[in-house]
Image (cartoon, grey):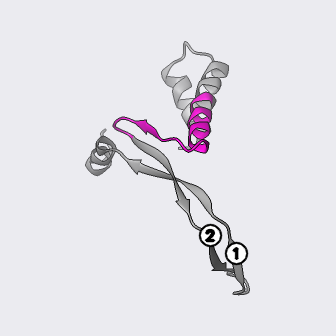
Amino acid sequence: MVRAELKQLLATEHPEISAREIERIVNSFFDVITAHLARGGRVEIRGFGSFTTRCLEACISRDPRNGEPVDVGARRVPRFKSGKYLQEMINIGPTE
């Protein structure tokens, strides 16, 4: 599911909310999570999972096109750990 599909699903399930308002809600939700992670914070959505950042040290990698060494600086990368409820729902499969 991509962001546009999420907006469409919310619009279908909640016709009383305007499309513009749904777009603002979805964008705000992702903006808040992104900003908090950028500050080094942790975001937990109970039952769904948690988002954190992880620090990767600087290293020397190889350019896949020519095999030459490339210096890769230290950086933070996002990490997601699924919650217990989400794992259970995935293992049960779709309910129809």
Q: Is residue 3 above or below residue 26?
A: below
The reply to whether the magenta stretch includes residue 32 is yes
> Between residues 3 and 81, which one lies in front from this camera angle?
81
Where is residue 45 shown, x and y percent of the image? Answer: 41, 35
Where is residue 17 shown, x and y percent of the image? Answer: 57, 15
Q: Locate residue 40 relative to residue 80 in the image: left or right.
A: right
Where is residue 57 shown, x and y percent of the image? Answer: 57, 67
Residue 16 is drawn in which quadrant?
A: top right
Q: Residue furthest top?
A: 16
The residue drawn where x is 54% and y is 16% is: 15
Where is residue 53 shown, x and y percent of the image? Answer: 52, 51
Residue 32 is drawn in which quadrant?
A: top right
| Mark 1 Cα shell of 10 Å, populated few (<14), some (14-19), many (≥20) | few
Q: Is residue 55 above or below residue 61?
A: above
Q: Secondary structure at mark 1?
A: strand
Q: Quadrant of the C terminus?
A: top left
Residue under label 1, please give it: 71
The residue drawn where x is 29% and y is 41% is: 85
| Mark 2 Cα shell of 10 Å, populated few (<14), some (14-19), many (≥20) | few
Mark 1–mark 2 CB contact (< 8 Å): yes
* Sequence-earlier tag: 1 or 2: 2
Q: Secondary structure at mark 2?
A: loop
Q: Is residue 2 above or below residue 68?
A: above
Q: Locate residue 30 relative to residue 87 in the image: left or right.
A: right
The residue drawn where x is 56% and y is 63% is: 56
> Between residues 17 and 56, which one lies in front from this camera angle?
56
First to last magenta residue range? 28-48
Q: Is residue 63 above or below residue 40?
A: below
The residue drawn where x is 29% and y is 45% is: 84
Callout count? 2
Residue under label 2, please give it: 58
Q: For the residue marked with disc 2, what is the amino acid?
A: Ala
